[in-house]
Image: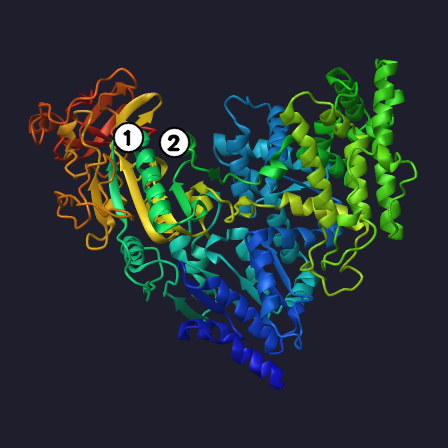
Amino acid sequence: MHTSSTTAQETLLEGLTERQREAVRHTDGPLLVLAGPGSGKTTVVTRRIAHLIASGVAPYRILALTFTNKAAAEMRDRIARLLPPDLPGVRGLTVATFHSFCARLLRRYAPLIGLAENYSIYDTGDQREAIKQALKIAGLDSKNWTPASVGSAISNAKNQLLDAKAFAAQANEFYTRSVAKVYTQYEKILRQHDAVDFDDLLLMMAKLIRDHEGVRTELQERFRYLMIDEYQDTNHAQFIIAHSLAAAHRNICVVGDPDQSIYGWRGADIRNIMEFEEHYSEASIVPLGQNFRSTGHIVKTADTLIRKNRQRKHKDLHTELEDGERPTVITCRDEHHEAQLIIEEFRKLREEKDIPWKEMAVLYRVNALSRVMEEAFRNAQIPYVIARGTAFYDRKEIKDALAYLRIITNPNDEVALKRIINTPTRGIGKTTLDRIEIYAIQNQLGLFDAMRQVDQISDLTARAVKAVQNFVSMIESWRAMEARAASSGEAMPTDDAPPHDEMLIPDRREDVADAEGEAFGGRTPFADLVERVVRDSGMEKLYRSAKVEEERERLDNLNELISAAAEFRPAGDAPGGEDPDREGDDRAGSILAAFLESVALVSDSDAIDPANGAVTLMTLHAAKGLEFDAVALAGLEEGLLPHSRSLENPSDIEEERRLCFVGITRARRHLLISHAQMRTQRGFMERTISSAFLDELPADAVNTLDLAGDPYGFSDFGATGGDVEDDRGGWGRTSGGFGSARKKNFPPRSDGGGGARKRDADDPFIDDVPAVEYGSWTPKSPSASTSRPSGGGGGVAGQFPVGCTVRHPKFGIGRVEGLTPRPAGTSARVNFRGLGVKTLILQYAKLERIE
């Protein structure tokens, strides 16, 4: 073996634990790396790929798949920096997301599966519009059948590799038969528009590999080493793709953690990782349990919680870092008090621990909890950012410009065409469009082809005909420019453009750099094309002449889109990237489709910028893969976390526990967990029940603080009052850090549970506690005397024994399944028809027993 290669292999093992070295050294055969949170997973993945290359494996034989473009780019960059210059680099190495990998291969093999090579990829908005049209054709009322719910059902079917025909064949009841009708029409619309949605990319790829042995063999030989990151998040279609690619050589390495499988609601199947050894009996298993991120108490808190799950693979989570501060669980009065306490603690950490805002995050289960948090941070003048997705490409003017570009490459994309046919206004109104659509249907034409024949359509005014002809001419001129550039590789002709001093958008040719960072004299033809689209379409003139500043700012966004076009190069990790004819091609014809593809495949996670100088507010699902010095985990209440939809299914409860585990393990040094005694629901203040997960936290690693003070006078619900000394009226801290005041440890649960605190119930919201309308109540003094119901509510309980049938004025008919004595009075678990299990306090519930 070459000396340099041997040295590189040894260098790649430096600084690793023995378990990490074991994973990196593994070369042939299946490998499962169980990577706990903060265990150095990325280091192991990148070094293992670099080690394969250093061991003599050709880079083009390696395929690495992950779930975000950002992760793929970072992985490729780190691998390149790990390899010494005298060894093969990453040229030909394929590092991509599942969707981008499939999209590129489908373009190559498009004729085999009946796709046009220039197909469009519909994003969520495009898909919604197409489903609306399908609902209308299927004759279903959009009031009862929402595009979101039907789209979710279709997505689930595609993830199970069921096309419309297969789904219809197994539809055996009203709901699935109705969805099948929409699915069939939706699929027809996609084919008519030469379009696919995100799920189609996986479905069609799986079918391509399954049905075409030649393609399957070619890809198996090309990609002899397969590595998949975040394997616990794969769905059935992704499993089939991976399993098919690895079938010949069985050199498959999957990295993941069943304890962090939190995307079951969108099709992720935890069985893929749990049953890996069943599919690869010869597999090696390497658990990575050492956490390099979080302090000892945080790791112990997370480990103790997740051990309650049954569906998991055991890992001994531990850390060699100091124990640090204990996580603190606080009881708040309501959501406003909760936000106030979090803000106060974050300010303290910034002032006393010098932790920057960008290293702090507030995590919650549902987006609805962000409203109060946003208001509180805004009023406190603390910078914050909401991680909701790709804001730039969601902006109206950007989506309009992209729609124009989509029409250039695919005139059959009617969703894009209808979006911009009269944007900006050009005299093509609804009546004109309706008549063109009728003509298209009668003559079996696509909408754009019908527009080409607009002079043959009767009942159109001369003005409307001229407007349509001008629109078609404009699109055709751009398509011709693209075609010339694609065939010749020469710069776009600009002799018909206005002189430079008349151009409204500044020319940035001097500032553009190529993919290697070296300046060159001319801008890419693709950037010229985008600029021409922005100018000729009228968008530039529209926003430059706008009177409102917000509208004028849209021009800046369009300028930024032109910059993005100038900087864009097709990904070097595309299959076939080792082909010199494909790599480095900057012709507009080849770049346009790649650019649109890259934009369509940008994910929510790609939009989260950890460098922002602001506190991050995000859902627990969005927080996956991130880490912060300080984390506040808000809303630990039954019905929120765990979510109310999960309470009837043990496997769903386990996923909710995994979600809580993910939230805890985002914290490096400081962790605050909060729950409110009262929370506003539909405009009313309602009593909440603290999350069952709080009882599962280790009492010897977690501090608890009751800061609610029972201000509402609901002491009969077991509230203990605010007995934490706090001269400042806040946390009662004597120094920075969560929970450094004199703490109140909650008494153990009445059922003998060993949790860190007492909770009132272990089911969803108690719906029938008398609601107090916000603004109409007067807080009672904590010292005011309050009456208390009889401790067990035994007399009431005797009227509703287990098994009896009851009627509730809101929930209807139900059956009592269990009774539990509580300080507030006996609670009953009632299973209501069509609604599932509700927990009610008998003292307050308006139940009627039915004999």
Q: Tag 1, which secondary structure?
A: loop
Q: Earlier in the sequence, mark 1 or mark 2?
A: 1
Picture disc at residue 376:
2
Picture disc at residue 334:
1
Tell which tag, 1 or 2, sits nearer the viewer. Answer: 2
Tag 1: amino acid: Asp
Seen in the image, is 416 located left or right of residue 644? Answer: right
From this view, report whether residue 136 is shown above or below residue 747.
above
| Image quadrant containing the C terminus | top left
Tag 2: amino acid: Ala
Crowd band around label 2 with a 10 angstrom C-alpha radius: few (<14), some (14–19), many (20+) = some
x and y percentages locating residue 651 in the rendered image: 35, 47
Q: Residue at x 73, y 41 (%)?
A: 562
Q: Residue at x 25, y 27 (%)?
A: 814
Residue situated in front as seen by the camera: 364 or 830: 364
x and y percentages locating residue 202 in the rendered image: 60, 50
